[in-house]
Structure formats: structure tokens, C-alpha cells
Amino acid sequence: GGTLFLENFDEMPKAVLQKLEVFLTSGQYSRKGNTETLIADVRIVVAAKKLSDEPAWLSNLSGAVRILVPALRDHRQNI
């Protein structure tokens, strides 16, 4: 197990998001050029500037929690 942090999630190509969906829903993956199926137990943390085009499957994942953090430029008094 471990944690994978994906930055700029909102800028990822749709093809990558589709592969990520398969991995997150099944926990299975295969290495490039190999047909052997492997299983991983990982936690995924994603960061995005905006999630206006959030994939529907993202909110359907078990344990998915959405935390909105406002930009610091909007809260200068907190710096």
C-alpha cells in the first residue's frame, strides 16, 4: 500500500482519466508491454485548480471525499 499524489488532475487527458478510472474501480493494472494483471492497494490524493468537469465516476468511488480549499489570494489575512 501507499499514497499516490496527482497534481493538476483537472488538466489530465481524458485517455489517462479513463485508465485511472479502471484502476481505481478494480485495483488492477498491467505494466506496459505485459499482459500479467497486478493488484495494488493504494490511496489516491488529487489536486486540481478547478473541478468543473469532474468525472461522474470520481464521486461514486467508495471513500471519496471532496475538500474545497479556497485560494490564499482570496484570504490574504490568513497568510
Image (cartoon, grey):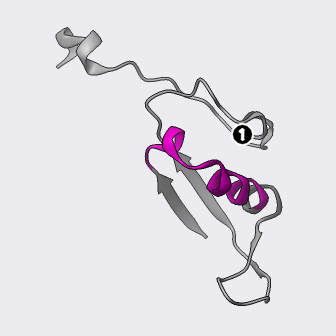
Q: Nearer the viewer, residue 13 or 34?
A: 13
Residue 73 percent across, percent down from the top left: 24, 16
Please, what secondary structure does the residue beneath circle 1 have?
helix
The overriding secondary structure of the stretch rendered in magenta is helix
Please state which amino acid type lies under the numbered disc 1.
Answer: Leu
Residue 22 percent across, percent down from the top left: 78, 59
**What residue is pinned by disc 1?**
58
Drawn side of residue 14 relative to residue 11, left or right: right
Residue 32 percent across, percent down from the top left: 65, 83
Residue found 70% across the figure and 72% down from its top = 40
* Stretch of the chain drawn in magenta: 7-22
Q: Is residue 42 above or below residue 73?
A: below
Residue 2 belongs to magenta span = no
Residue found 59% across the figure and 23% down from its top = 52
Q: Is residue 3 above or below residue 60?
A: below
Drawn side of residue 36 relative to residue 17, left or right: right
- Which of the image's four quarters has the N terminus? bottom right
Drawn side of residue 19 relative to residue 77, left or right: right
Residue 53 percent across, percent down from the top left: 63, 28
Q: Nearer the viewer, residue 28 or 53?
A: 53
Residue found 74% across the figure and 34% down from its top = 59
Residue found 69% across the figure and 68% down from its top = 41
Q: Is residue 65 above or below residue 74?
A: below
Drawn side of residue 54 relative to residue 39, left or right: left
